[in-house]
Amino acid sequence: MNLLSPKKIQLPNGKMVVEKRSVTPLIIIVLLLFTIVSINITEFKLEVIVKQINRLFVIIDEMIPPNVEYMPSLWQPLLDTIKMSLIGSVLGAICALPVAFFAASNITKNRLITTVVKFLLSLLRTLPTLVVALIATYVFGLGTMAGTIAIYLFTVSYVGKLLYEQIENANMDSYEAMQSLGLTSMYSFRYAIMPQVIPNYLSTTLFCFEGNVRYAAILGYVGAGGIGLMINESIGWRNYANLGMIILMLVVTVFIIETISEYCRKKLM
Amino acid sequence: MIEFIDVEKQYPNGLTALKNINVKIEQGEYVAIIGLSGAGKSTFIRCINRMHGITEGSIYINGMDIRLLKGKGVRKLRRSIGMIFQSFNLVTRTTVLKNVLVSYVPDLPFWRKITGIFTKEQKINALTALDKVGILDKAYVRVDQLSGGQQQRVALARTLAQAPQIILADEPVASLDPVTANLVMEDFRKINKELNMTVVMNIHHVELALTYADRIIGIRSGEIVFDGNASDVNDEVLSLIYSGQEVEDTSANESTISEKNPVA
C-alpha cells in the first residue's frame, strides 16, 4: 500500500510537492505472474525443445536440395496465389475508402453510424483470415474465389481501420475552409482530407498486399486455392524435397514483391 | 446587407457567447470587430455564414432570414460569403493553384467533382485571382513551401475566386509579422474599395483596425458596447471595450508593433 501512495518532497522553504509513484514495478510483477501462469497452462518444457530440436534439422536436411523437377507444376498455383492476393487487396482497398469515411468521427457526425461501422471493422479483424477462407469455401466452393473473398475482407478491415485513424488525425482547418466555401461534407472530405491521407493510404495498401501474398500461400490449407494446396499435399506425402521447392519459390516471390512495394512506399512518403 | 436582430447565441454547455446583438452592416462597408479573447468575436463572425447557429433572434442577409435555411440553402449562402482564417486553412500538401480551384467545386458536374479535373476557363480565373494578390509566380508551388504572408494571400485568392459579396475574416493577420500584416490589410482594403465587397473582420491589433477599417464594433462578453466610425475611437472607448484593466497592456502592445513597423 505504501508503494502506491504518493511520495511527498519538502523543499527547504517548507513547500510540499507531491510526487506520483511510478506504476512500472507493479506492471512488471503482474506481467511476470501472467507469464508463469501461461507456462503452466501451455505445459511449456525447455527440455522438450532441447531433445526434439534435431528432428527439425532432419526435415530441413531432406528439403535440401529442393526437387527442381517439381517446379513446372508449381507455376500455376503460385500465379493463383498472387492473383488472389492482388485482386483481393485492390478491391479491399477501394472499399476501405468509403468504409473509413463513415467510421471517422470527425467527418461523419452521426455517432450511431461511426460506432456501428467501427464495430463491424473490429469484428472483421477478429475473424482470422483462415477461418473466413474456410467459411468462404462452403459458400463459393473450393478454389481461388474463396481465398480472394477472405483476403478482400481482411484488406477492408485492415486498410479501413488504419485509414479512418489517419482521417481522424488529419488537419481539419482546410476542411473548415471547404465547408465555408459551401461544399458538402463529402466534397470537403474529397478536397481537404484526401490530399492529406492519400500517400499513407497507398502505402498501407501496398503493405497489406505484401502481407496478403504470405497469407494467400497458406489459404490453400483449407482448400481456398493457391500454392497452400501444394504445401498441404507435400507434407501429407512426407515429400520434403518438394516442400523445399515450394518454400524456395515462395520466399523468392515474396522477396521480389516486398522489394518492389518497399521501393514504391519510400517514393510515396 | 447584413442585419442582426436581437441575436442570442448560447452554446450547449450553457455559455452565452452573444446576447442582444442588433447591428446593420451595409454592402461595401469595412467593419473591424475588436474585443478581448473569448468576448464572442469569432462567434459573431461565424454566425453570419451559419458555421455556427444562433439560439435566439434572426439574421438577415440581403433580406433573407438565414436561420430558416437548411442543407442546400446553407451551402448556397456560404457560396456567396468568403471566409479567411487566422491559420489560413489551406490544403498544404497540394499546389497553390489547386487550393484556389477548390472554390469552383460546387458548380462542377459530378464526374469533375470526383476526378478534380477543372476547365481551362476556371484555371484562367483562378490564376487571375492569384495575380490580383501578387503571387502568380507561386501558382504551381506546394503550399507548405510558402511563407505565412504568402499563404494568407493564397487564402485571399481562394476567396476572391469565389466572387463573394461579403468577406468574413477571423484574425487574418494574427499569425503574421507586422510588415506582412500591413500588406495583407492593404489587400483587404483594395478588395473592399475596388470590388465593393463587404469586409467583416475580427482583429486584435487595435491600431491596424483603426488605420484600415471604416467602422469599429466593440464586443465585450457577448454584447456590443461600441459601434461607430474608426475616427471616433479614443482611449475612453477602448477602455470600455477592454473593460478598463486591459487598456495599458493593449496600448503597450500597439506601440511595440508600430515601432517595428514603419508602414503604420
Image (cartoon, rainbow, N blue to C red):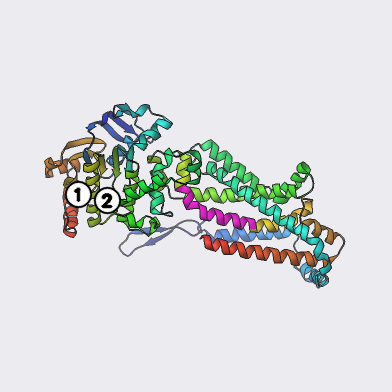
Q: Residue at x 22, y 43 (%)?
A: B194
Q: Is residue A107 above or below residue A49?
A: above
Q: Residue B189, percent across and down?
A: 22, 46
Q: Specify the principal SS of the magenta part.
A: helix
Drawn side of residue B170 relative to residue B212, left or right = right
Q: Amino acid at mark 1?
A: Leu
The answer to whether residue B246 of the structure is visible from this angle is no
Q: Residue at x 54, y 37 (%)?
A: A113
Residue B208 is labelled as 1
Please state which of residues A124 and A145 is positioned toward the viewer in this rendering. A145
Q: Determine the chain carrying the residue at label 2.
A: B
Quadrant assignment, res A266: bottom right
Q: Would you say residue A194 sits in the magenta stretch?
A: yes
Drawn side of residue A268 relative to residue A87, left or right = left
Look at mark 2 in the image and give the residue it sits on: B173
Quadrant assignment, res A210: bottom right
Mark 2 and mark 1 lie on one chain; the one further toward the N terminus is: 2
Is disc 1 surrounded by few (<14), some (14 to 19) or many (20+) residues within 10 Å? many
Find the distance from the CA under tag 2 to the CA under tag 1. Answer: 10 Å
Q: Residue A172, percent across and down?
A: 42, 47
Quadrant assignment, res B215: top left
The answer to whether residue A196 of the structure is visible from this angle is yes
Residue range of the region highlighted in magenta in the rendering: A192-209
Q: Residue at x 29, y 37 (%)?
A: B165
